[in-house]
Amino acid sequence: MKRALILNSDEIRQKTIRIAYQIVEDNYNTTELTLIGIKLNGFTYATKLKSEIEQIDKNIKITLLELELDKLNPLLKDIKLKPAGSLNKETVIIVDDVANTGKTLFYALQPILKFSPAKVQVAVLVDRQHKLYPVSPDFVGLSLSTTLKEHIVVEFDKKGNGSAYLT
C-alpha cells in the first residue's frame, strides 16, 4: 500500500497548538471545558489538545472523557461516554483525528443530546471534506481534499507522538 506523509509529529504539534489557541479564544468567557475524545485516536488527540490548552490558560478546568462507538456500524453497539456524568451547561468539544463523511461525529452527538450543554463544538486534526452528514468541524488542523478512494491514517505511538498519512 502506497503511503504519503502529510503531517509529521512536529507539524501535528504545531497544528494542535493552533487549535488549542482557537479553542481558548472562542471560549474566552468559559472557565470549564469538557473534551470528549472518540475512542482510540480521537481520545489520544484530545489528550494532546488538553495538554496544550492547559499550557495556554491555566485557569480553565478541563474534563477529559472518552466516547466509545463502532465507527463503521454505530447502531450495532451502545455508544458509551466514559466516565458517565452530566454535561448540562457544559461547553463540550468533541475531538477526533480525522473527519471524513461526518458519520462518526453525527453519532457521537447521541449521548450528548441527553443533556443540555451550553455549547457543542468539534475539533479534528484532519478534515477530508466529504460530508454526507450535517456535522462540520469548528476547529481543523489540516483541511485536505482527497478522492473517495484515498484514506487518511493517523498513527500515534505510546508517547502520543504521531504522523498522518494519505493512503
Image (spheres, helix red, strand yellow):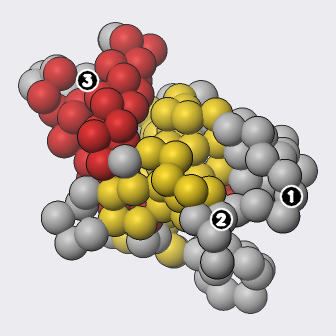
Please say whether residue 94 is visible from this viewpoint.
no
Q: Could you give the CA–CA distance between mark 3 and mark 1, rounded to whole angstroms?
A: 40 Å
Q: Residues within 10 Å of mark 2 (few under 14, many from 20)?
A: few
Give SS at disc 2. Answer: loop
Q: Nearer the viewer, residue 29 or 104?
A: 104
Pointer 1 residue: 148
Among the 4 quarters of the image, the one containing residue 155? bottom left
Q: CA distance from mark 2 to mark 1?
A: 11 Å
Q: Indicate the quadrant containing the C terminus: top left, top right, bottom left or bottom right.
A: bottom right
Residue 122 percent location from the top left of the image: 56, 39
Q: Give the Cα distance between marks 2 and 3.
A: 40 Å
Could you tell me the amino acid type at mark 1? Answer: Leu
Q: Amino acid at mark 2?
A: Thr
Q: Relative to 3, is 11 above or below? A: above
Q: Label 3's element?
A: loop
Mark 2, mark 1: which one is toward the viewer? 2
Give the mark nearest the N terminus, 2 or 1: 1
Q: Which residue is mark 3?
A: 31
